[in-house]
Image: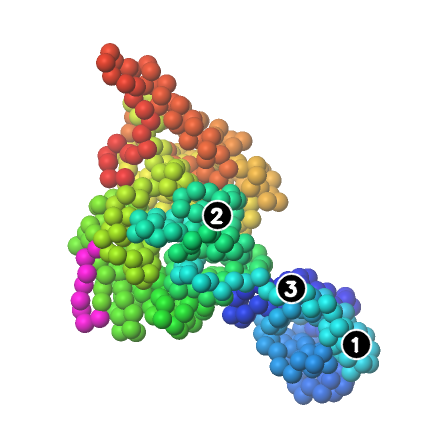
Amino acid sequence: MPDVVAEEVRLLEGPNLYFTRPAVKVRLDLGSYAAAPAPQLESLARVLGLRARIGEPESAQRQAFLARLVPHVIRSVARAAGTQRVGIRVRAGQRPGELTVAAVWRRRGRARVLGEGLAPLLQGLLDGADGPAAIADLGRAVATAEPGAPPAVRAPQVPVVSITGTNGKTTTTRLLAHLCMTAGRTTAWSSTDGIVAMGEVVEPGDYSGPAGARGVLDTPGLEVGVLETARGGLLLRGMGVSANDVSVVTNVSADHLGLQGIDTLDQLAEVKAIIVTVTKPDGWAVLNGEDPRVWAMRARTKARPWAFALDPAAPALREGINGGGRGITVMDGDITVLLPGGVTERIVALDQVPAALAGLSRHNTANVLAATAAALALDLPREQVVAGLRDFVTDDLLNPGRMNIYTLPVTGGAATIILDLAHNEAGLDALLDVATGLRRPGDRVFLALGTAGDRTDDILLALGEVAGQRADRVVIAHKEKYLRGRSPEEFQTLFGAGLARAGVAQVTAHANEFAAAAALAAVATDGDVIAVMTHEQRARLVEWITERGRARGRRERHPGKGPCRARRTPRRGGV
């Protein structure tokens, strides 16, 4: 039989999937226990003083037994180390004997000794070691271990907003930070693009985890912190703060499945819900009322619910108000807050909010509603919130890589080109919604299709199918830095299979995003719309678009007039 293996031992520094406190997580392969004869485990259970049904090998009952055995062993070790009470949670995995256990910790060194000693202890018990003696030995090792540093989680001294979701996190984070700065608050925020204080990048890079939270809270004179909180950081380190004043969950859709033990949408929703579990009781949980998994998160928080929904008739809006909360929606073309007693408060006309892209993008409009609700939940003055909404533009300065729209000179006139960090099915749908909305009757939508290699085969197939259904011309844009274990040929095969489902035959593949965009521009004519899923060459694409505009301007310059420059808004206005 195979040995007991600790496939992962991880110290979670802050609120996490298991507890609202730091925890040590151990992912175990107990295949040898799952396959062991029942009499062998019955004997072990008697030695350990555990009364439980053992079950047949690799049965559901055997898995249930293991889910009781492992916490029993940990509690026995904790008592041997002098700790009478310890919080423990267990989750079963996909395979027989696959189990994840988490226990609350206070001192790093002791937690690591416990985590790393658990698998050898369980192996020894299965091999017939003296159970009480083996448990006592690990207990002594834990008790005498160097305590180590306490958890790195921070308790904020200023209002903090945590923002998560599959799509829209970064845009909502940037927009909310802009609203806070417009209201005169010293604001810092962290996201996948870095740590930013009052619009100045302090540290570039992906800081959507605990390190970003610490960097934000270290900002001198900070008055508001806005923290993008991504799935990876939550699973690998936990949250960087012990509590927040406002939490925002934008949506939950298929992305990053099959990683870190998260295989289903329901499991992913549990991860996203972590941020609402630590929202203060007098704070607000701003939740997407049109996403059932997100709206269900209100049951996991003591904070007041604030539902946002594009449909003013969405039941969640009424449920939120009846639950002591508020709602926000678009009513008769206006962003409108819904209050108890049927009271409504108009905030601003949607067509005065550039980030909503004139209503073309449902996703961006939802992001606007979420950010507006969060800003009002922070008690920012309404007039300052409105001012900030009116001057936040989704360009490469305020919101790089998110629905950045430009005019590109092409044969016979000009095309519209959209650069967006679409990386999953929902993101691609949102990008193509905008592209379709900007297309004039008779014009075409072109797409440079690509994403990162850590998406499942099903997601890559779905992306190809959506592309084939909704774009008039598709090319594949490879992303060398984002292959993540896949080969370019795998992308072409899976995208191609998805495209074939939509009736699209072979498509051309290009080495990178720039080559793909240039190829589409070469065949575009006046009025066409080019959508680019950009991840690694956004800056180069922006330079190229700008230079093409300048070159055309030099060719078309008239006496007494300056050159025509590349515009960052579509010809039809509203963005």
Identify the residue at image location x=78%, y=83%.
132
Disc 1 versus disc 2: distance between alpha carbons? 45 Å
Q: Amino acid at mark 2?
A: Ile
Q: Secondary structure at mark 3?
A: loop
Q: Residues within 10 Å of mark 1 (few under 14, many from 20)?
A: some
Disc 1 marks which residue? 137
Q: Amino acid at mark 1?
A: Asp
Q: Which residues are magenta?
A: 340-347
Q: Is residue 133 visible?
A: yes
User: How far across and how far down the image is residue 348, in percent?
Assistant: 21, 52
506 over 456 or under it: above or below: above
Name of the residue lying farthest toward the front: 221
Disc 2 marks which residue? 195
Residue 525 in magenta stretch:
no
Relative to residue 90, is residue 117 drawn left or right? right
Q: Which quadrant of the rendered structure holds the C terminus?
A: top left
Identify the residue at image location x=50%, y=54%.
218
User: How far across and how far down the image is residue 456, in percent?
Assistant: 54, 51
User: What mark, if any, has residue 149 been given in the picture?
Assistant: 3
First in sequence: mark 1 or mark 3? 1
Disc 3 versus disc 2: distance between alpha carbons? 25 Å
Relative to residue 543, is residue 555 drawn left or right? left
Relative to residue 143, is residue 484 drawn left or right? left
Identify the residue at image location x=40%, y=59%.
161
9 over 397 or under it: above or below: below
